[in-house]
Image (cartoon, rainbow, N blue to C red):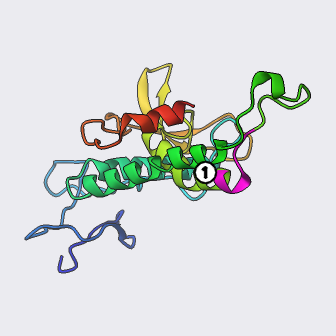
Amino acid sequence: MEAHSVSFAKNDKEPKLAFEGVVASELYPCVLFYSSNPGEKVTLGDLQMRGMPSNLLPGEPLCSPQSTALVECTVQLLRRLHQCDQWTPHINQYIHANLELIGPMLKEDHLGRFQNDSDKDPSEDPHQSLLSESKLVALCNEVWPVLALIGGVDGGLRAGGLCLHKPSGRRAVLLGVPKERSSLAKLQWEEADLSISMSQACYCGTAGNCFNQLQK
């Protein structure tokens, strides 16, 4: 209690740390029982820590690869922080500053490179990028992460993400698959929707020209 942390343990096993830095004047230990009969000896048989068990795999290729699953978890965490008053202005400032990079990068590379249709080489690939390699790297490193935060990376099945169990119509968290290329997955039933969308109400400050440049 003095460390302001919360841990959970199953029966006589070693407690596992779940939360640190809990802001509260007092913390009280809590014991869970399945039975309300006084004096009855009980054991917890199906208690498990939330999260992807270490013995399960992400489920590639039927589910997103591990790298995508980690990115989506990071996006969900940042979206939660974005809804906190202490974090909102800092995240907004970062989004605004990085989206503002789009215009100067595109404008600088297009200067002096405009050609009339009659001057274009017929053999030239019309889809070839006009951006230099350094500009593409900068856009991927600085702008793409912001777009991932706003729109997500992969909305498909992934370990740690929500899915719908069609036979029952219930929502569940996909924990992973027991072996590679398996079509069977382990689920954890979930009553609440834990997915977080980017809050437009918390975000302001980006000029419309940023999104115009983005469309181009």
Tell me: residue 185, above or below residue 90. Answer: above
**Where is the C terminus found, in terms of image quarters?**
top right
Q: Is residue 123 visible?
A: yes
104 to the left or right of 19: right
Pinpoint residue 183: horizontal percent, then vertical percent.
68, 34
197 to the left or right of 20: right
Residue at image x 73%, y 39%?
A: 129
Amino acid type, label 1: Cys
Say which residue label 1 marks: 140
**Where is the N terminus found, in terms of image quarters?**
bottom left
Pinpoint residue 174: horizontal percent, then vertical percent.
51, 40
Highlighted magenta segment, given as a residue range: 129-135
Residue at image x 59%, y 44%?
A: 106
* Residue neighbourhood size for the residue with mark 1, other residues' Cα within 10 Å, grouped as few (<14), some (14–19), many (≥20): few
Pinpoint residue 169: horizontal percent, then vertical percent.
43, 20
Q: Residue 159 versus residue 119: which sits nearer the camera?
A: 119
Residue at image x 68%, y 35%?
A: 62
Q: Residue furthest bottom?
A: 2
Q: Residue 95 versus residue 2: which sits nearer the camera?
A: 95
Q: Residue 148 versus residue 55: which sits nearer the camera?
A: 148
Tell me: residue 126, above or below residue 42. Answer: above
In the image, residue 63 lies in the stretch drawn in magenta: no
Residue at image x 32%, y 49%?
A: 80
134 to the left or right of 119: left
Q: Residue furthest right?
A: 123
